[in-house]
Image (cartoon, helix red, strand yellow):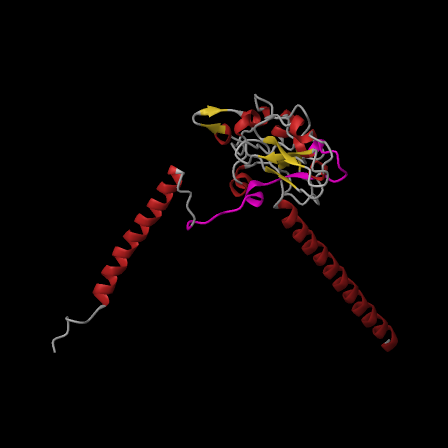
Amino acid sequence: MGNKGDKISRRGVLGKVTQGFAVLGFGGFLWGGALRDFSRADLVLRPPGALPEADFQKACIKCGQCVVACPYDSLVVAAPGDGVPNGTPHFIARDIPCYMCTDYPCIEECPSEALTVDMVTSDGKASINNAKMGLAVIHKESCIAYWGIQCDACYRACPLIGEAITLELEQNEQTKKHANIKPVVNSDACTGCGICEHVCVVEKAAIRVLPREIATGEVGAHYLKSWDESDENRIRSIKEKKESNGDIHSTLDYLNNLDGLIDE
């Protein structure tokens, strides 16, 4: 009986150890997956008209109607392991970009306003050209146009040719005779449709579309474009706010100052 009990005990211990390793392994898998999901989720490209990401995730009911409505099969539903919140729509520019339908069927089919015409409206006018799905960024070191090899594939494919992507002529530093024709992205006009990335001729696209909050910088309030009236107004409002806060602080300082309130 003792031997049998010992065998059961050993089996129980081995079973628990095996279960423990399984749990740890599964937990590591989940944690690793969570890390991958987080990093990929930061780079997700949403359909035109999408609310800011946090609001989009709250509003999207994962119905897939926008995916069905897309005539180019650009939109896909995120599945487990994709690194994007499950069930939400997104597109991969290198595979199938957004072809910027002028009647934006994906927005029209959205029942929850996670995609809304308001996000493609500017100065009271709705247009797919106002979409801000992302921003194209050029890696100059791998763009062959910056090497001096003639290539304007991204420029010619751009739906807003001459606006979102322009060509800049620069003297070839090696030959001193020829011109390098370099693509330049205008961030104000770029919609982030991803067509430029899709058509890029190099093995790994030298022009990539990133979410705008990742692709763009932020100057900060202490720099001023003196020629820009809106910037002047921005600085003025900051100054007024500081002065207002200063009045509050001076009042608090006065109330906290006991000098003159205590009889000598």
Q: Quadrant of residue 147?
A: top right
Q: Is residue 207 magenta?
A: yes
Q: Which sits in the foreground, 27 or 130?
A: 130
Q: Nearer the viewer, residue 29 or 156?
A: 156
- Classify 6 as above or below 123: below
Q: In the image, is residue 102 above or below residue 253?
A: above
In the rendered view of the protein, which quadrant contains the N terminus? bottom right
| The quadrant where residue 200 appears | top right
Q: Give the magenta range.
A: 198-222
Q: Residue at x 55, y 26 (%)?
A: 128
At x 83%, y 71%, the residue is 10
| Residue 77 locus on image (x, y percent) | 66, 35
Extreme-top residue of the structure:
103
Write the residue at 52% across / 36% down: 51
The residue furthest left is 263
On screen, residue 19 versus residue 105, left or right, reads right
Front residue of this view, candidates 217 and 60: 217
Residue 93 in the image, given as x and y percentages of width and height: 67, 35
Q: Is residue 193 magenta?
A: no
Magenta stretch, main secondary structure class: loop
Quarter placement of the C terminus: bottom left
